[in-house]
Amino acid sequence: MMLGALVLTVALSLQVLAAPTPIEVEQRADSSVTVINAATIASYAPYTNFAAATYCPGVADWSCKACKRVPGFIPYATGGNGNDVQYWYVGWWPSGSSVVVAHEGTDPTQFLSVLTDANAFFGTLSTSLFPGVTSAVQVHSGFRDAHAATAATILAAVKKVIAERSATKVTLVGHSLGGALAALDALYLKLNLASTIAIKAVTYGQPRVGNQEFADLFQQKITDYSRITNIEDEIPIVPGAFF
């Protein structure tokens, strides 16, 4: 499912969506489909490799197979254990002129990461992490808690890269559960960094993250967002429509 699934997702059926919740299953048959040209697909290759690298050893020195497909990237911080805390990394991407934050997705061999996905109850966001967000905004509590476990550490690493590289852009990337964490990070960083810092998010096979109020807030705050899915993948339509 890991690197191969990411490559297959891009190669077989890209659907780049501008909203944080997916189109309902029953609407897909009636939706018009726009064919994406090869150049557009190719432009997502670096983000695919950033996401794939989260599953690989060798991220700290940027020596893994997926890492080598994005030469010149400079890791600043890494963390997680792949179980109760998903692997993540923060670094500087010179050719993209961006800080990059990437999160690992669900590893089915790691029981606690699967439980994080399964813990699909509503919950409010911490106002200490998401200042100004009201209790009407509800999210998947498993995703929320997983995000909270690394939020402060990632923010500190991002601020360090911004200071050292005079960066003006942060890109969030993730696959599956990692996509949900990337989406939460995008909103979190938007609310906690200077307004001059542009936020971009690219996710692959991302599940639903929150309710309609969350979706509305996310869409208002994060205007550069690509959610890439495979029509055969069921993960982007879970949790169910009640979300």
Image (spheres, rainbow, N blue to C red):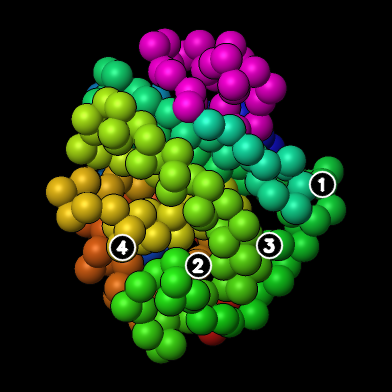
Q: Position of residue 236 (x, y in %)?
A: 53, 59
Res 209 label = 2
| Callout 2–callout 4 Cβ contact below 8 Å | no
Q: Magenta span covers which residues? A: 48-76
Residue for badge 3: 117
Residues at circles 3 and 1 in contact by the CB criterion of under 8 Å: no
Badge 4 is on which residue? 191
Secondary structure state at the residue bearing disc 3: helix
Q: Is residue 54 magenta?
A: yes
Query: Which residue type does callout 1 highlight?
Result: Gln
The amino acid beneath tag 3 is Asp
Which three-letter amino acid code belongs to the residue tagged 2?
Val
Mark 2 and mark 4: Cα distance apart in space: 17 Å
Disc 4 and disc 1 in contact, CB within 8 angstroms? no
Could you tell me which secondary element the residue under label 4 belongs to?
A: helix
Instruction: Please say if 135 is above or below 68.
Output: below
Query: What is the three-letter code of the residue carrying label 4?
Result: Leu
